[in-house]
Image (spheres, helix red, strand yellow):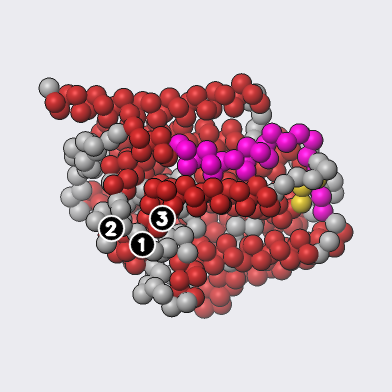
Amino acid sequence: MYLLYTMSYQLISLVFYNLILLFLLFVWIKTKGWQLNGTLYILFFLLFSGIISAFYWNVSNGTIRNYSNLTLIPFFYLIIGYLITLMPIVKYDITPRKELSITNKQGVFLHYFTLFLIIISFEPFGENLLHLPSVIANSDYAAKMYDSRVEYLSFIGRKLNRISTSFELIYPPLLFYFLQKKIISKKIVYGLIMVILSFWIHELGLGGRSKLVQNILYLVVCFFLMRPYINACITKKIILYGSVVIGLGICMVLLISISRFTSIEAEGSNIENIWIWLGLYAGEGVLNFNSLMWYVEKSTGGDSTFIFLKDLLGLTKGSGVEDNWATVSKLGIPGNIFYTYIGSIFEDFNKIGTLIFLLVFSTITIKLTKIKNGLITFPQIIILCLCARVLVIPTFYTYTSLMAQTNLLCVLCFSMVIYLKK
């Protein structure tokens, strides 16, 4: 009887969580209609992730994970965190009659700097293309590459790829910036598409999926944020051709997933089928936050949110993924599973501190992206894209690793340079 009551309460908690997300989506659609914008996409994606969480709870509770202590309050906390983070995007989407403001100096700088980034990406792209047949021809290749983590690029390819990767967060906004221009430079547009595809193929070649999925989700939300400035005819072409490209990207992810699942199945995993395994990545975050992270009272001392600063000051022993897992494990919970992006911040600041962090983050973003006289600058668009990236990758905090924070700093400096070239 008690077991039945416990399972009913867990289910009710999950249902309420998804109903609240559905209600928020309904209110937004009722207010703004079915306009393609960042808020609609993010709310829909959060609801989709919530539904996946319910599916994963149903098939994993008591077998893969123990979710017997799910309650309503942590779910409410997550939704409050989502709404705080979402406020800059909402404010942007409800502002009518926006125009993108770019001065001649800014336009010239963007043109030549983008050309530079495209040129240095040619060599890594060529190596990635040459390596691609090995991945496609061998179904086990992706799993082997993931296990070994061997970088296949040459010395020059690695160096050029690292420079290009430093600005990976800027490529989607740049692509849509050049697509919104009255006179579209096809060479630059095709060049940026090449750079983005190069990153995707490189991740495929290394057997990874996480960054590949992140880049796809980020590309889509950048399109939604830039869509108001793009010609309707161009928008239709973007949706058509973009769907094909993203479809290929999803096929890449599935290819790697099948290889990885076959590998762990051979090792005797208790995960019965690949759909449960995929559900683990898409849906376990909110469940793990509710059942584990919510009860943590210790702190990692900034290792998730300020790893770049701590590494710069020599205050951390390591900055790799395994080091982060080890740090989180000291909190008394597994370090190698997802807790949502709010959970990653929670590791550093706990219940009250996390909400304060999100409020400060959201307030600063709103201040920096304030639209004046109906005009918004390209650096402001970049900041909004960086904010939206946190929400469309809700499984974990996308700026947790040292490399991610280094790349974030590069893009923020890039945005500052554009802003100063008035």
Marks 3 and 1, how far apart in space?
A: 8 Å
**Depth check: 275 or 292 in front?**
292
Q: Are marks 2 and 3 in contact (CB under 8 Å)?
A: no
Classify residue 107 by image quadrant: bottom right
Q: Quadrant of the N terminus?
A: top left
Left or right: 328 with respect to 26?
left
Instruction: Name the residue beneath numbered marker 3.
Output: 349
Q: Which residue: 32% across, 48% down?
A: 293
**Depth check: 336 or 20 in front?**
20
Marks 2 and 1, how far apart in space?
A: 8 Å
Q: How many marks?
A: 3
* Other-residue count near label 1 (Cα within 10 Å), few / some / many at <14 / 14–19 / ≥20: many
Of the image marks 3 and 1, the number of the one nearer the N terminus: 1
User: Of tags 3 and 1, which is closer to the observer?
Assistant: 3
Q: Which residue: 45% across, 71% down?
A: 310
Give the vertical position of 269 relative to 6 (above or below): below
Left or right: 105 with respect to 75?
right
Residue 99: horizontal and vertical position, in percent?
Answer: 80, 42
* Other-residue count near label 3 (Cα within 10 Å), few / some / many at <14 / 14–19 / ≥20: many
Name which residue type carries label 1: Thr
Disc marking residue 331: 2
Residue 94: horizontal and vertical position, in percent?
Answer: 69, 34
Residue 211: horizontal and vertical position, in percent?
Answer: 48, 55
Which SS class for mark 2?
A: loop
Of the image marks 2 and 3, the number of the one nearer the N terminus: 2
Marks 2 and 3, how far apart in space?
A: 12 Å
**Depth check: 135 or 388 in front?**
388
Name which residue type carries label 3: Phe
Which SS class for mark 3?
A: helix
